[in-house]
Image: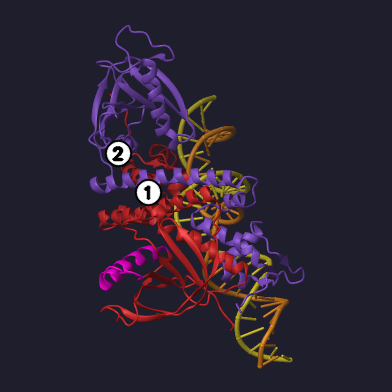
Chain colours: A purple, B red, C orange, D yellow
Amino acid sequence: MLRRVNDDDPLSIGQFARLVRLSVKQLRHYADLGLLPPAWVDPDTGYRYYRAHQARDAMSIGLLRSLDVPLTAIKDVLSGQDPARALGDVRDRLDDELARRRRSLAALERILARGLPTAEVTLWREEPQRAAVVRDVADSPQDIGRVTSAGMRRLLELAGPPGEGVRLIGLFPADLGEYVPITLAATLPDGRPAPPGTTLDLLPGGTFARAVHTGPYDQISLTAHALLAWCVERGHTAAGPIREVYIDDPATTAPDDLVTHLLIPLEETS
Amino acid sequence: MLRRVNDDDPLSIGQFARLVRLSVKQLRHYADLGLLPPAWVDPDTGYRYYRAHQARDAMSIGLLRSLDVPLTAIKDVLSGQDPARALGDVRDRLDDELARRRRSLAALERILARGLPTAEVTLWREEPQRAAVVRDVADSPQDIGRVTSAGMRRLLELAGPPGEGVRLIGLFPADLGEYVPITLAATLPDGRPAPPGTTLDLLPGGTFARAVHTGPYDQISLTAHALLAWCVERGHTAAGPIREVYIDDPATTAPDDLVTHLLIPLEETS
DNA sequence: GCTGGACTCTCCCCCCGTGGGAGAGGCCAT
DNA sequence: ATGGCCTCTCCCACGGGGGGAGAGTCCAGC
């Protein structure tokens, strides 16, 4: 005869905690959140009593927590109308998080190999130049990479493959706020009109602090940090958006070999 | 003539914050931690003043924080004796974290595809059996996978490739504490002695709740959760360590197809 | 020199999920 | 009835900040 507890036996919080491998503290917290209310609460003593059939929910919570799912999302999964959708959202969030951490790790590897970012900075004069531009806005600094690559694809579709002497340039505000306006430009040979869907713009010239980044685009911020630090140390302030000049084609060049020029326009008092 | 601020000009916390793209709150916090003390603090007013040459450290902090490096680790990197070593530690930590999240994501994908874990559970009688065992201890529940696979390699080296009818079994305590003793067993045909380096043990028989897990080993916990929930719902308590019987050879079977039997010994009052 | 607005100071509370601990009261077997 | 667990509520801690109150400071314009 197998020993068993009747399902109707009320379990004290300690017994239930041992069964489902959660701490008493956790169970109380989940009860307070309405995530896993006890089957019965003694109105006199406040003692929480659970039933065995609540074990499945309790263990599901433990499982999802071990996957770093936030309690609010777990609540949606367990008691929402559409658990699959809620789980899908959680999956997407976790997926983004994973990708971000992968990039972080790669950046850290680079720092480990080359030390904290430093950049050889040169002062650089740039002439004003006409360009066909498209504009977009990233909703957060994390979104810049995605928006930039999407925008650059759009620009290349509208303007066609870059001919000889055409340079592809990204312009980013020096102050990254919540919304980041991004301008992507393809320089235009003299007199050529801007293709439909793009806007003609004149990129101002002047003196720039310039550094060269070699490596994946999502690590540009490392060199940009170093270049900004260089400017700040010398008391220069950015007089306009920071420019990235994409020298290589990411379709034909390995990410580790991609060369990008970073240009910060400097204020002049001439 | 380029406009520039003299490096000796003291910068107020707000100016410095704008320069290095950190919040005033953050700078104050880093100052309190001794991570980035201001160049000078006015003893009368408590105002913090920074110098431009501190921008590099400040931006390095911002960079490392964007990689989720804890402030204590950043302190080691910036002011420790061995920045490379500190960075290496951070890298390793991030690497582990990444691997863990990758596994979490895979588990979540499985849950999304099959719903929250459920298992077909059968009651199962098992005869006592002799086995050659090796033992090990995992320092944390997260370490179980690593220790188990290492221990199983050791067992197979000592006991040789499993012959006909030999079963490979892992035994894990039902209560996962901080230290998890793990026993790995290869069943022995009648009368065969335990190979050197292994111990002879008698695995007790009895009645078990049994579920079959199909999929990667690091997702066994999903089925185990379901099996444990089944037991708890019916009021059964584990009468000993939980067994995993590894049916397939991970060297020749794809992870998604690996079959593992999970057995929980049940208390009997005969 | 004075005033107003922008800046900065300290201090406290908030987020998340959880653990630790105090002090009071309840449950149950002897 | 008593002792030894158990459980209750309430507060504080972590890390890495954000938000805001109330008071004091700095500096440009007049």
**Is residue B157 found inside the magenta-colored segment of the image?**
yes
- What number of labels is visible? 2
- Residue in front for this viewpoint, A19 or B121: B121
Disc 2 marks which amino acid?
Ala
Local packing at callout 1 (Cα closer than 10 Å; few below 14, some 14-19, many 20+) is some
Q: Foreground mark, 2 or 1?
A: 2
- Magenta span of residues: B142-166
- Residue found at x 38% / y 23%: A184
- What's the chain of the residue with tag 1? B
Residue B81's quadrant in the figure?
bottom left
The quadrant in which the C terminus of chain B is found is: bottom right
Q: Inspect this view and state whether residue B70 appears.
A: no
- Residue found at x 72% / y 69%: A46
**Is residue B177 found inside the magenta-colored segment of the image?**
no
- Residue in front for this viewpoint, B10 or B229: B229
Do residues under tags 2 and 1 come within 8 Å of each other at their CB atoms? no
- Residue in front for this viewpoint, A201 or A160: A160
Query: Relative to B65, does residue A44 appear above or below in the rendering?
Result: below
Judging by the rendered image, the residue that carries numbered circle 1 is B40
Relative image position of residue B106 (x, y in whole percent): 44, 50
Disc 1 marks which amino acid?
Trp
